Amino acid sequence: MLTQQHTLLVDDEPGILTEVSLLLASSDIPGVATISDSRQVLRYVREHRVSAVILDWVMPNVTGAEILQSLTVEHPEIPVIVMTAMGDVETAVTCMRQGAFDFLTKPVDPNRLVASVKKALQVSELGQQNRKLKDYLLADTLGNPDAFAGIITTSKKMRGIFQYIEAIASSRLPVLITGETGVGKELLARAVHDVSGVPGPFISLNAAGLDDFMFSDTLFGHKKGAFTGADSKRDGLISAAAGGTLFLDEIGDLNLASQIKLLRLLQEREYYRLGSDLLLKSDARIVAASNMDFAALRAAGTFRNDLYFRLCAHEFRVPPLRERLEEMEALVDYFVHQIAAQQGKPAPKVPETVIAALKQCRFPGNVRELYNMVHHAVTCNEGAPLSVADFPGVAAVPVRAAQPVDCGDNALFSLFGRFPTVMQVEEYLIAEAMKLTHGNQTQAAELLGLTRPTLNKRLKQERQ
């Protein structure tokens, strides 16, 4: 079984392995594995999931050049950063031509190395997401269907969102979910958390109406004595979400002062409690949601551009209910049975006329509004099938009587004495083609634009 590793560091000098490992760990680059014997590298990469390799160029046994060549052939998706004391242009050109992601000269500048590794990990992650999305599109499957079991839908758009969530599950970068009120953004945020498989909890905070003090105190916590009434220390929700997911709902309502503090948390993964000068680290993944138009907010200057681009590392829009009416029947049926069970009564039947009438509504409150409407209808119901009258404000769809169709001088009507079905026309064309070709199936198939096996199959079906 493959085990998860993010970065593999290869160098024959133990001192460099220790120094670079500590540098990367202090720069929030997790999961760094080290190898000093270059002969072990290829086997290690085959047995572990490696997102990036930092490779020394000059080593005994197997050289960096040989390893790079093998990696680019066997694992072209893994970015390789070459480190070497040979700083000549010829070596650099050779590395890049062989497929190296970057070339760094020893002694390596720490900032340059950290920036290069982070960029390599981002490239690797995007490639992994693209491969997953391609697999999902071709197979149309979900790897973790249980994570979406609480979301009732038959919509292809929603299934596409599920597949996107699975593709970004392994990423720890922020996720921004947009969509109108009541479309189910928090349910999808929980699905992001569940699919990612992180050990920590899912913690939610609604940012609407919070001033900067309340936001900071709720999110970051405070030190004892930080302000009047602070009789004890408060850890804050970001601490509670350690190792898990912090969901920030209505993020578009956040004031500018709070936006600056959130930006620092996203950029540095660091924060201070109120009244404390002790710098704390956070590993919680941030998932944010809003029903607002961020383009308009940014244009008006009420939402910072830099914060928006930090939040939307992964972004998707949840379509409103009126754009996925195909799931109306499944949603109503689910809500009816759920509400009836809660109230201890049998679930009333839902005629097609009710579904047709509900499909005509705009639903500005989306799924939440539909739930409230069904709740009212089931609560007031006395056991009879639901009717449109049980849904105040919903108009019945008028039923139009079928009008006879005047076929006039239509050739098909004249030929069959009535307007034929598709199957009848097909049988007639096959019979005529067989007559014209005197029973030659190959020629008849050519006339009909079919393959001979297909024609033979149709003929057998007619005889049955």
Image (cartoon, rainbow, N blue to C red):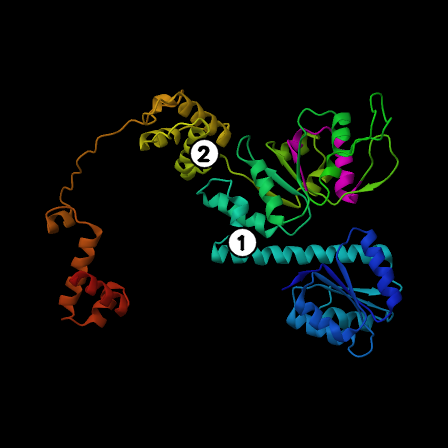
The residue singled out by tag 1 in the image is 143
As for residue 133 lying within the magenta part, the answer is: no
The residue singled out by tag 2 in the image is 322
Question: Horizontal and vertical percent for residue 192?
Answer: 60, 44
Q: Residue at x 63, y 58 (%)?
A: 127
**Drawn side of residue 46 relative to residue 338, left or right:** right
In this view, the mark in front (1 or 2): 1
Mark 1, other Cα within 10 Å: few <14 / some 14–19 / many ≥20: few
Q: For mark 2, give the secondary structure.
A: helix
Q: Residue at x 53, y 53 (%)?
A: 143
Instruction: Write the start and end of the magenta stretch as one range.
Output: 245-270
Q: Is residue 319 above or below residue 87?
A: above
Q: Identify the image quadrant of the N terminus.
A: bottom right
Question: Horizontal and vertical percent for residue 386?
Answer: 34, 26
Give the image quarter of residue 244: top right
Question: Horizontal and vertical percent for residue 312?
Answer: 66, 43
As for residue 256 lying within the magenta part, the answer is: yes
Q: Is residue 442 visible?
A: yes
For marks 1 and 2 on the same chain, the one whose residue lies earlier in the sequence: 1
Pointers 1 and 2 in contact (CB under 8 A)? no
Q: Which of 297/142 is in front?
A: 142
Question: Horizontal and vertical percent for residue 264?
Answer: 78, 39
Q: For mark 1, give the secondary structure.
A: loop
Q: What secondary structure prevails in the magenta region?
A: helix
**Drawn side of residue 454 relative to residue 207, left or right:** left
Give the numbered dot on residue 374.
none
Q: Residue at x 87, y 58 (%)?
A: 109
Q: Residue at x 66, y 55 (%)?
A: 125
Q: Amino acid at mark 1?
A: Gly
